Amino acid sequence: MKPIRSRSVRAIAIAAVAGSLALTGCSSNSGKEGKDQSKSKDDAAAQSKPVEYGDAKASTGPAAPVPGAKSGGTINAYMQSDMSHMDPGQIYVSDAGQFANLVHRGLTNYQEDENGNLTVVGDIATDSGQSSDDGKTWTFKIKDGIKDEDGNVITSKDVRHTIERQYAKVIFDGPTFVQTWLSGADYRKALPDGPYKGKHLPDSVLETPDDQTVVFHFDQPRPDLPQALAMAGYSIVPEKQDTQAKYDKAPAALGPYKVAEYKSGKSLKLVKNDQWDPKTDAVRHQYVDGYDFTTTIDQTSQTKRLIADQGEAKNAIQWTDSVDPAQIQDVVTDPAVNKRTIKGYQPYVWQMSFNLDKIKDKKIRDAITYAIPSQAMIQADGGKYGGELAGGLFAPTLPGFDPKYDPYGKLKKPNGDIAKAKELLKEAGVKEGTKLTYAYSNSPRGQAQQVIIKDALAKIGFDIQAKEIDRATFYEQIGKLDNPYDLYMTGWGQDWSSPSTVVTPVYDGDQIADGSPNYSHIDDPQVNKLIKEALKLQPTEAAAKWEEAHKRIVEEINPAAPVYYSKQIQLFGSNIGGAKYSTESSYLDINDVFLKQP
């Protein structure tokens, strides 16, 4: 999941972002001077290389130094609103994913080379994990010298606590891969109160034989576990530091930076964590003294400040916001400004999600799909720098992506097919003036696109009731099962390089719940069956099953209309060094930045 605040990066997600969907062409400042360049689907497809699993040597710190890097100074980070979350267990959105890489640490993490190639390495673990029992059992050893910001030594008990707290209802907005793999779709029933009342998962599921060892036991092979554990949502929450719901506002750091001050709705200050030992960390650096976040600067103002490049803006970056669409030409046509951008293809697909509890007739969903002017939606998000037309729900960054797949003719008619939409609504017996409630984020993109949606759907006879939601809580609100909305734009990106991380979390009927990213509430027996079958196969063997599920979802059910594949363009100040596009985060690589003149 950009200000896009899409799920995942990997995350990032996002969104989570995918295993190795990297844009090696975006690993530098991107764009030759004076050239008005954007990234294409070919760029995305060229980078889908397999992620490697690193050994103990690859997992040993310190991280390779960034050429020319200097120490000192403070980076100013521009945001439009607060972080969606700071509690790792709740993190499944891109802004918080970036934050997590500075403050939190997990068992594993992604190490990224200068060309954007990714290797999963041990973060607090000594390596990326050792599998046995045909991949059903995974063992991790914890490095010596891992401490939280107060000097408490991290042990296997803290890892167990981190996993078990995800079972408690206090955690409602993060990833669920590991929990469901360990305990099934109804995982909360296995430990309803998490670890907070003294109960634990049995050793046959999660075992801590000593302070340095953690063993995961699954009922089937889980070859992707090292990638799942690299997600920000599985970062360590020390048992001694856990304040449950309050932890979201004051988390304890294991990473190179810690929260020094947080003013809700205004600012956030990070300073160096003196308990972080670079010798234990093969990924991160601690070049700058800290980060000052201002969470009240809108996208337009961010862009203006960074174009001007005066005063404190020289030391500033856009956190996960992109260049203001109205100012993109000012950026890309000025060589001096354009060289201060990073550009890249993201793993996110923007889609119009339908609440199937409310819009039950597929003909109505199809009509809306045909009516949406995808090109206009892209223009409101930066034009060719913001995205490309989508034909399906699998992004170009996924292995096996089919660029010709277009069952609704979105590539052929990018401005929509109003006549086809009206024909379907007539067949469905929909009356002129029928009301639909459309929820949208109060970001500039969300506000601009809601005007487009209202206009397009008015042309086919709907009376759209647009409901604005604060961008910081947008996914939380639409993630409620009893939400009052008929449709909403959502962005989703694979959590690693596998269709399983798209189909399973977003379209698996067994995972319908409050906080689940199954925003459409799709529960199709055939799709559910295909998911179960595919998850038992190795990735190459599972590919056909995932594609079958994808086509059934898009063509026969249509829980979400594909609108566009997302791209990113971000600005940074002239005193920022080490800036490059990150394959892992699909944003500025936050691990490598420094100030040229501290």
Image (spheres, rainbow, N blue to C red):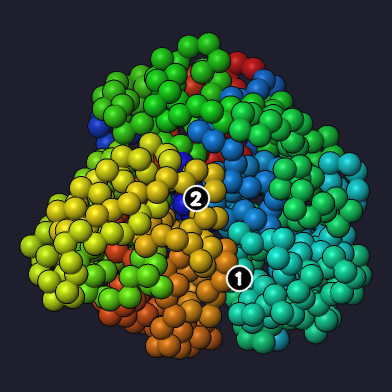
The answer to whether residue 584 of the structure is visible from this angle is no
Given residues 528 and 99, the one toward you in this image is 528
Name the front one of labels 1 and 2: 2
- Neighbour tally class for label 1: few under 14, some 14-19, many 20 plus, Cα within 10 Å: some
What amino acid does circle 1 point to?
Phe
User: Spatial distance from mark 1 to mark 2, Cα to Cα?
Assistant: 22 Å
Question: In the displayed structure, does residue 501 sit left or right of residue 288?
Answer: left
Q: Residue at x 49, y 39 (%)?
A: 320
Q: Position of residue 182 (x, y in %)?
A: 69, 78
Identify the image quadrant of the C terminus: top right
Q: Please, is residue 546 above or below residue 446 in the view? A: below
Which labelled disc corresponds to residue 298? none
- Neighbour tally class for label 2: few under 14, some 14-19, many 20 plus, Cα within 10 Å: some
Residue that lies at the very extreme toward the top in this rendered image: 311
Q: Which residue is mark 2?
A: 474
Q: Position of residue 547 (x, y in %)?
A: 35, 77
CB under 8 Å between callouts 1 and 2?
no
Q: Quadrant of residue 75?
A: top right
Q: Which residue is mark 1?
A: 177
What amino acid does circle 2 point to?
Phe
Q: Residue at x 26, y 50 (%)?
A: 453
Q: Please, is residue 79 above or below residue 170 in the view? A: above
Q: Secondary structure at mark 1?
A: helix
Q: Residue at x 47, y 52 (%)?
A: 6
Residue that lies at the very extreme toward the left in this rendered image: 419
Q: Position of residue 324 (x, y in %)?
A: 36, 31
Q: Earlier in the sequence, mark 1 or mark 2?
A: 1
Question: In the displayed structure, does residue 284 sit left or right of residue 68?
Answer: right
The answer to whether residue 448 of the structure is visible from this angle is yes
Q: Position of residue 378 (x, y in %)?
A: 27, 46
